[in-house]
Image (cartoon, rainbow, N blue to C red):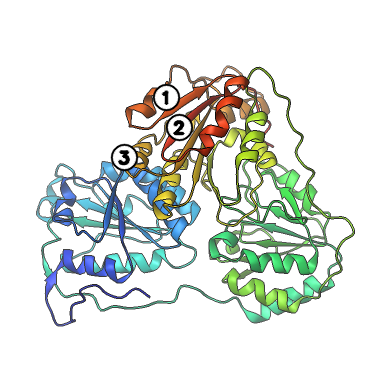
Amino acid sequence: MPSSHNARKSGDWTTVREATFDFFRSVGVDTFFGNPGSTELAMLDRWPEDIRYVLGLHEASVVGMADGYARATGKAAFINVHSAAGLGHALGNVYTAYRNRAPMVIIAGQQSRELLPNQPFLGASNAADFPKPYVKYSIEPARAEDVPAAIAHAYRIAMQRPYGPTFVSVPADDWNVRCKPLVPRQISSVTAPDPRMISDAADAISSAKSIAFVVGAEVDEEGAGDALVRLVERLQAPVYAAPFAARVTFPEHHDLFAGFLPAAPAKVSSTLTKYDLVIAVGAPVFTYHVPGPSDLLDSDTTIIHLTTDPDAASSAPLGTSIVGSLAFGLPMLADLVDVRPARSEPFARPKPVIPDRGTHISPDYFLHRLGREMTDDTVLFEETPSVRPALQDHVRIATWNRFFTMASGGLGYGLPGAVGFGLAQPDQKVICLIGDGSFMYSPQALWTAVQHDQDLAVIILNNGGYGAMRSFSKVLQVRDVPGIELRGLDFVELARGMGCPADRVTSSDEFDARFASFMAQSGPRLLEVVIDPEIQILY
């Protein structure tokens, strides 16, 4: 447990700024993400040497980096953004952080209190309402003296499951006001599931004839992967990755891993209604992207749902939901269920077909090569939604805490998320696989990677447009949609302009000659891979 640095006695007087920095140190904060503005200068004055300030060149990048950092460490990240429009710039990735369940405290500047009644320049009207509903807690304290306690409150809520972002708006003239120091406190953040419901679930599992698991990101987030594997192996049941899981759900080389469920109701129900019992672990029941009929409601399939998220439990349309820590619930279940004999035939997916090597680089051929170059200790951040099914086929993640994407569906997370992860784990080799359209949402994060000399390999798959939109246009049978094609972007020069070595390959011959060398290098680097703009099948 972190101890307070330079702790002050409760009877002492200090300033809002010093009380806040004492709190930061008491909870182990050594890194702060930000894009500073004039309304935050009093906070930034004489920045302490023991807390690293990581500059992002756009607020969306700042929040994305903090998200990646929080997911790497399991600790709340702290962020400084500018007032009003600065927070507005950040909101897309605030939504992603909310859906990613990434703990963070966002501290935004606000104009001085004496100016607020007169609609001042840089003043945010109703600042606490601005990021709602995608923060767990939001406040502009009524008094300057209340700022340190509000930030501590925001931190504690961010660290309660389900994790997520919180927000505090601080007027510019609050930081130097005298106040009392905070009293150090500790609050538990893990709750156990109801033992009776776990016992009833174990009875249902032991009596079921056929069982399947659907697993989501919460398992990796909680560090409960080994407990899940133990339970699954006792039951010899197949495991499906939940639709749009934003982290590793199960070792993908395991004999019991059966593949990824698509985010389409009919396909999910056709897969799951074959089983008497479905155990959904750490995922909603279920996440869909397209409408359609589902036979689950009218089937004989029973669903038992384990989650840390009360909202996911409350919104589930069917099944029994048990809310509580998976790190507690899964071992409890494993101890109570009957062991089943090993199956004569495993559920493992067939090995992917090695794609043909043509003159041009197909998405499948690139992903096949990427899968060969990946090692178990490589971290992959992915933001290529148009080729994700092919990625899942060719790049099989075998280790926990090694795959991350955005749970929101919003672009602009992948690159800053990878940078933030690398800042938390500087000895870790990180790959950011990103589309040409996605890259343009937060390209500024590449500059931060260069400044910190990160071992980050950025791979841009350039198919000349928004591939997912091409796919949906085909599925929905619409034609001549504007705004899908992207032309005239020079990613190599863009990267070099931020100090990042960069290269481009346009043919299979170039790719084969350079890719292994690119992957073996260290430091920040970018490779643009021009791929066939073929329309991918998403569902």
- Visible residue check, residue 309: no
Question: From the viewer's perspective, is residue 440 above or below residue 61?
Answer: above
Question: From the viewer's perspective, is residue 362 above or below residue 212?
Answer: above
Residue 58: mark in rendering: 3
Provide residue 252's location: percent of width, then percent of height.
69, 51
Q: For the N terminus, give its image quadrant.
A: bottom left
Q: CA distance from mark 2 to mark 3?
A: 20 Å
- Visible residue check, residue 29: yes
Q: CA distance from mark 3 to mark 1?
A: 21 Å
Q: Which residue is mark 2?
A: 526
Q: Quadrant of residue 172?
A: bottom left
Q: Are marks 1 and 2 in contact (CB under 8 Å)?
A: yes
Q: Which residue is mark 1?
A: 492
Q: Nearer the viewer, mark 2 or mark 3?
A: 2
Sequence-earlier tag: 1 or 2: 1
Q: Amino acid at mark 3?
A: His
Front residue of this view, candidates 10 and 31:
31
Q: For the C terminus, give its image quadrant.
A: top right
Q: Amino acid at mark 1?
A: Val
